[in-house]
């Protein structure tokens, strides 16, 4: 067990408060702090207390660092990436590829040059992800029932959206036709429709309507604002999570949370951003099936909470420590992240005391973790 130091990513949508406040730094931070990466992804590897980048440490002794089981399954790489995520503004409308799509896309783009400006696939891995809220967290996650979406859109009373409602109600068209139609609109066409829809929404006293008004204010001519009408809008309370499998169209709107994902940075964007948008590639990876309940299942076992996911790359546990030590026996590499109080984490090779927002890494061959103190601790694993 030794300290692990992450990399802050200063994306424009980040908060200047959340991560800095958690870590006891001066607020506001000089720049928006959107994410802190804790892992070994080549784009921004964390650093161990002894000064080694985590990816280099794993490459030099993969079986020792990962454990035999994880090494046999994933090779010489940490299969997950843990993040603190602080959304001060909406993120881009996006989805992530499955393993087959990521591999073929990465290979295709290697032939056109790894530094190409229009690159989509920075690695060959899929990117399912789980976000657990630390504060109230607003998000759009997955397609809703198209008939319900049509009814709500019709209630806005915008004549230019009548064709969209008809498409959503057509069983031969539905979301498969509606989404490309919306993303194919010009900025000029979108501006008038979005303005009318936002004015109608401003008269409604619902959170979904407020989302539309806020998005329209930030992106007055972006087709992604209209696509947002087709998505589930949810509010997570602290301790609740949302699991986003490959192909799930989503956008985080506002809040602070802990996010874990397969070790990838592959993102296909469709709007609500100044970054690269590739509508055709996004449509290739989208899963158009409706999702009735996007919130993740919660399993509580005493002081330990988990959110089971149907993949092998990662698992996440939250432990509420109240003074009595807790032993967590997880096979494989572990990243421990404190989000409150003062906690000490130990394995059979050392111990680290963590203040809020600080992390530690435990090798896959270092035995069970013993956590003590009073506070909240997340443990990421394969």
Image (spheres, helix red, strand yellow):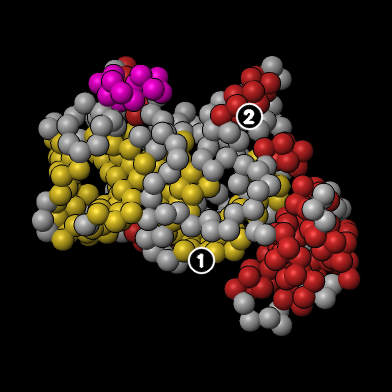
Q: Are marks 1 and 2 in contact (CB under 8 Å)?
A: no
* Mark 1 nearby-residue class (10 Å; few <14, some 14–19, many ≥20): some
Q: Which residues are magenta?
A: 63-76
- Residue with the mark numbered 2: 101
Towards the viewer: 153 or 60: 153
Which residue is nearer to you in this view: 141 or 174? 174
Residue 330 lies in quadrant: top left
Q: Earlier in the sequence, mark 1 or mark 2?
A: 2
Q: Residue 40 bears which disc, if any?
A: none
Q: Is residue 94 left or right of residue 363?
A: right
Q: Residue at x 71, y 32 (%)?
A: 118
Secondary element type, mark 1: strand
Q: Secondary structure of the magenta portion, mostly?
A: helix
**Image position of 7 (left or right of 164):** left
**How far apart in space, not on screen, are marks 1 and 2 (Cα)?**
30 Å
Quadrant in which the C terminus appears: top left
> In which quadrant is the N terminus drawn?
top left
Is 336 a magenta residue? no
- Which residue is nearer to you in this view: 243 or 112? 243
């Amino acid at each position: 067990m030794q300290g692990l130091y992450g990399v802050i990513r200063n994306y424009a949508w980040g908060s200047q408060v959340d991560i800095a406040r958690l870590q006891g730094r001066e607020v506001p931070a000089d720049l928006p702090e959107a994410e802190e990466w804790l892992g070994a992804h080549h784009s921004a590897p964390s650093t161990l207390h002894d000064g080694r980048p985590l990816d280099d440490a794993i490459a030099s002794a993969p079986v020792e660092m990962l454990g035999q089981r994880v090494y046999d399954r994933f090779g010489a790489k940490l299969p997950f990436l843990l993040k603190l995520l602080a959304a001060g503004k909406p993120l881009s409308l996006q989805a992530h590829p499955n393993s087959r799509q990521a591999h073929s896309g990465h290979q295709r783009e290697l032939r056109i040059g790894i530094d190409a400006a229009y690159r989509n696939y920075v690695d060959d891995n899929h990117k399912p992800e789980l976000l657990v809220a630390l504060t109230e967290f607003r998000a759009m996650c997955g397609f809703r029932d198209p008939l319900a979406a049509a009814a709500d859109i019709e209630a806005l009373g915008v004549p230019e959206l009548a064709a969209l409602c008809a498409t959503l109600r057509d069983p031969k068209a539905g979301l498969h036709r509606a989404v490309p139609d919306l993303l194919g609109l010009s900025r000029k066409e979108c501006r008038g429709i979005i303005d009318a829809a936002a004015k109608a929404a401003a008269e409604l006293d619902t959170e979904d309507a407020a989302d539309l008004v806020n998005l329209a204010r930030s992106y007055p001519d972006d087709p992604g604002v209209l696509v947002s009408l087709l998505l589930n809008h949810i509010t997570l309370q602290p301790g609740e999570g949302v699991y986003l499998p490959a192909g799930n169209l989503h956008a985080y709107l506002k809040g602070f949370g802990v996010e874990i994902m397969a070790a990838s940075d592959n993102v296909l964007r469709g709007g609500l951003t100044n970054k690269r948008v590739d509508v055709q590639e996004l449509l290739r990876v989208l899963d158009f099936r409706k999702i009735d309940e996007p919130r993740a299942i919660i399993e509580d076992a005493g002081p330990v909470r988990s959110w089971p996911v149907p993949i092998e790359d990662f698992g996440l546990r939250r432990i509420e420590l109240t003074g009595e030590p807790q032993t967590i026996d997880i096979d494989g590499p572990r990243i421990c992240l404190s989000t409150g109080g003062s906690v000490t984490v130990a394995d059979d090779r050392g111990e680290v005391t963590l203040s809020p927002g600080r992390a530690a890494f435990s090798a896959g061959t270092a035995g069970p973790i013993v956590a003590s103190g009073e506070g909240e601790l997340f443990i990421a694993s394969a």
